[in-house]
Image (cartoon, rainbow, N blue to C red):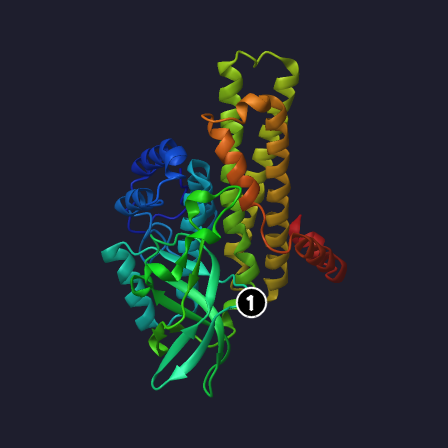
Amino acid sequence: MIEIKHDNATQTFNQVAFQNILQKIKLEASTSENNPEGLKTEFKWLEEIGALKIVLPGELLDFNKPNMPALLNMLQAIGKANLSVGRIFEGHINTLYLIHLYANETQRNHWFQGVREHGHLFGVWNTQAQNGIEFSTQTDQYIVNGSKTFCSGVGIINRALITGNINHENRKGWQMVIVDMSKIADDKIDKESWKPLGMKASQSYTVDFSGYLTNESDMIAHPGIYLTQPYFSGGAIRFAAVHLGGAAAIAENTIEYLKDLNRTEDPIQRLRISNIMMQLVAGKLWLEKAGKNYDEWADDKNQEDELIAFANMTRVTIEDICLRIMDESNKCIGARGLMAPYDMERVFRDLSFYLRQPAPDATRLNVADFFINKQKATHEFI
């Protein structure tokens, strides 16, 4: 359940309904993986209970309130039900947060209204290959050239935040732009580009935006602001929460599997279950502390380095925890437990793929540099 420590928000979110929807999403996960419609039904369910608007002003997890621990709990719960749904939902939250941080009032009102009244689903697509995004001037508009890769949720995303290079007398650098995906033709979407080990249901295709026309009203703030710290690195705790949700699903399924086989009296299996659950609880404690730190430090210029370091620590620690849980579960369930129709076959594939986030080694080195260079850091974290 989502735990909120203040009671002045408009309570429009039914948490019992949320738990029921999560159960439905979990039960549909095996079939939705191969559904050509993607996760359209799952996100329709989430929209109907108010999950898509939950971080908007006046809602239960309003970005203007210190709600990060509760938001991380929600992301973990959705990831536990289906990691692909969690990935796309986290991208939606990420986009709304960037709009919250950097868009002007008119833009915020417009895009937030789309979520409230039309159930618009947002996503952030920043990754690109050699043919990345460029914006060029065309009279009073800009024309987009190039593609984005790993575009999670293509087909159900209504508004995509893309980034690209712009070189104009008034704008130079890495620019954020909101794209209306209803204006992107189907032949611009390369579905053959997505042949992953796991996370198939996220449908993270390559999209060619060449020829799309945009203007100043679609551009968020000035170029370069997308990489502003501590928000850029600090946001890693959100996808780490979804990762831990996948590990929680593995832990739960492992115990159920052993119960079905009457193997829970085996002392070796009990030791493995103990190891799994201690790792899972440790991950939950890391997320709880990371959420509290974010709420306290995100807007404090004197704590930027601390926030980034703790977010980096959380991200790589959660990765390690997930890998340890997967290893222990593997030993518990053996080859038979990793075969369909058991859910673990899919969850293992999804989590193995989703854990591959950019620059894990560089992230660890940044943590080391922080502690080497900041004499007071140890006292801040303990």
Determine the secondary structure under disc 1.
loop
Q: Which residue is mark 1?
A: 130
- Image point 33% across, 47% down: which residue? 51
Answer few, some or many: residues within 10 Å of disc 1's Cα (few below 14, many 20 plus, some between 14 and 19): few
Q: Quarter-wise, where is residue 268 in the image?
A: top right
Query: Residue 332: in sight, yes or no?
Result: yes
From the top left corner, tell me how far across and down residue 202 is, in percent: 43, 47
- Image point 51% across, 40% down: which residue? 350
Q: Above or below — where is 270 with respect to 107?
A: above
Q: The disc labelled 1 sits on which kind of residue? A: Gln
Pick the front one: 266 or 311: 266
Q: The N terminus lies in which quarter of the figure?
A: top left
Q: Quarter-wise, where is residue 370 in the image?
A: bottom right
From the top left corner, tell me how far across and down residue 18 is, in percent: 33, 39
Q: Above or below — where is 379 with respect to 353?
A: below
Pick the front one: 59 or 29: 29
How many discs appear?
1
Q: Above or below — where is 363 with respect to 25?
A: below
- Image point 73% across, 56% down: which residue? 371
Q: Is residue 54 left or right of residue 332?
A: left
